[in-house]
Image (tube, rainbow, N blue to C red):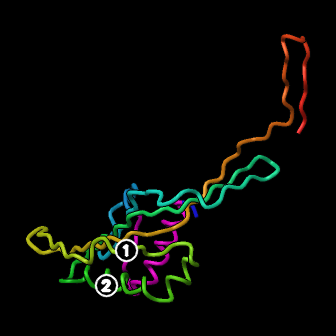
Amino acid sequence: MIISDIYSKLQTFSVAAIGIAGVKVNIANQSTPATRKPYVTITLSGFRNVARPIIKAADNDGIITIVTPVVTTASFHAYGDELHSAETILSNLQSAFNSELQNNIFRGELAVHRTLKTISAIPVALNAQMESRAILELELAFNLEKIDNVGLIEHLYLTDTRLNKEYIINK
């Protein structure tokens, strides 16, 4: 799984998991116009390898595939206009991580490793009214796949300067 796949699958999962009409799910740090509330933003950060690569394979064309177990922090920020609406949105989302929906969308490629920060309300005074905000942080585990074209050496030319001979080694 590559990182862009994680974002798109998390977005798909979140929309299905929240189950509240009108809630938009955005990827954070995108240059798009401000979304109308209620909405959720997803941020992935702190990618780190947790083990050595579990697969290192090369094919006959010089393409190498490396698969490494990785964890990342997924932050879900919910925003709403009604009192406690952000907490409700994230509560639905967190509950879905313990349901069959997780298996249906991620197909075993991504799983919750642990909860880093449970749902925390962060109410903010905005234009003389309270805006409902909440945050949920989870550590997600997945296998990161990297594909690289390392090429193949078809012939190796060696020159023995003492004997003034040249050797060609074919694969």
Whether residue 132 is in magenta: the answer is no
Marks 2 & 1, CB-CB < 8 Å contact: no
Relative vertical location of residue 100 with respect to residue 167 in this rendering, above or below? below
Mark 1: few/some/many CA within 10 Å (<14, 14-19, 20+): few
| Residue indicated by mark 1 | 114
Mark 2: few/some/many CA within 10 Å (<14, 14-19, 20+): some
Secondary element at tag 2: helix
Q: Amino acid at mark 2?
A: Ser
Secondary element at tag 1: strand
The x, y position of residue 79, in whole percent, is 26, 73
Dominant secondary structure, magenta: helix
| Residue indicated by mark 2 | 91
Q: Nearer the viewer, residue 17 or 144?
A: 144
Q: Residue furthest front?
A: 162
Relative vertical location of residue 41 with respect to residue 92 in this rendering, above or below? above
The x, y position of residue 116, in whole percent, is 31, 70
Q: Nearer the viewer, residue 98 or 92?
A: 98
* Magenta highlight range: 3-27
The x, y position of residue 139, in whole percent, is 39, 69
Mark nearer the viewer, 2 or 1:
1
Q: Residue 164: which quarter of the image?
A: top right
Residue at 40% x, 67% y: name it. 26
Residue at 40% x, 62% y: name it. 44
Residue at 65% x, 53% y: name it. 147
